[in-house]
């Protein structure tokens, strides 16, 4: 009688999709998809910068407008110093630090969202 044949499988082929490697390749090779992803990140960062610049312009630029509309507020003295000097000389720095802190936090969140998008397995 003849020998019985058996099938030998050396390795199983994975049926996984291309995964995050494909997206990273798109970025490194600067294809249209990669450029669109980077452009989206740049656009998100620019929008954030413009929004926070508007907050600073309104916050600090509104002070002279407030004192022009209500001149009596400019005559108020706190601790022997006029209110406009106090707000612009002392109050502006904590305001700018807070806006800077918010910008860094939100920009890092945008970058983390971008990284998560890149590393997310495709469906």
Image: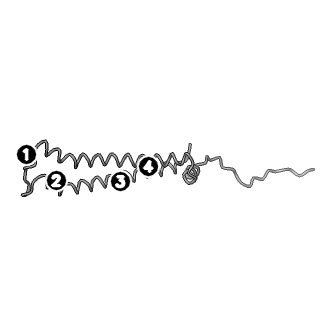
Q: From the viewer's perspective, is residue 93 above or below residue 62?
A: below
Decide if residue 65 is on the left or right side of residue 119.
left
Instruction: State which tag comes first along the sequence, 1 or 2.
Output: 1
Could you say whether the residue bearing mark 2 is in a helix, strand or loop? helix
The residue lying furthest to the front in this view is: 68
Could you say whether the residue bearing mark 3 is in a helix, strand or loop? helix
Q: State the residue at coordinates (13%, 44%).
A: 68
Q: Residue 70 lies in what quarter of the image?
A: top left
Q: Report which residue position mark 4 lands on.
A: 42
Q: Residue 85 lies in what quarter of the image?
A: bottom left
Q: State the residue at coordinates (62%, 47%).
A: 16
Q: Alpha carbon of mark 4 to alpha carbon of mark 1: how far?
A: 45 Å
How does the figure colour the protein chain or chains? one colour
- Confirm or deny contact between disc 2 and disc 4 (CB under 8 A): no
Q: Report which residue position mark 1 lands on.
A: 72
Mark 3 crowd level (few <14, some 14–19, many ≥20, 10 Å Cα): few
Could you say whether the residue bearing mark 4 is in a helix, strand or loop? helix
Q: Alpha carbon of mark 2 to alpha carbon of mark 3: how far?
A: 25 Å
Q: Which mark is residue 87?
A: 2
- Confirm or deny contact between disc 4 and disc 1 (CB under 8 A): no
Q: Alpha carbon of mark 3 to alpha carbon of mark 4: how far?
A: 16 Å
Could you say whether the residue bearing mark 1 is in a helix, strand or loop? helix
Q: Alpha carbon of mark 3 to alpha carbon of mark 1: how far?
A: 38 Å
Mark 2 crowd level (few <14, some 14–19, many ≥20, 10 Å Cα): some
Q: State the residue at coordinates (65%, 46%).
A: 15
In x, y percent, where is residue 95?
Answer: 24, 53
């Amino acid at each position: 009688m003849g020998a019985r044949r058996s099938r030998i499988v050396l390795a199983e082929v994975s049926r996984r999709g291309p995964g995050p490697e494909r997206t990273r390749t798109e970025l490194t090779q600067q294809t249209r998809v990669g450029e669109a992803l980077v452009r989206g990140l740049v656009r998100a960062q620019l929008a954030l910068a413009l929004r926070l610049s508007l907050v600073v312009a309104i916050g600090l630029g509104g002070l002279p407008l407030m004192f022009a509309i209500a001149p009596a507020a400019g005559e108020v003295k706190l601790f022997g110093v006029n209110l406009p000097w106090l707000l612009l000389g002392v109050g502006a720095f904590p305001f700018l630090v807070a806006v800077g802190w918010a910008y860094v936090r939100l920009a890092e969140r945008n970058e983390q969202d971008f990284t998560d998008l890149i590393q997310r397995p495709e469906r």
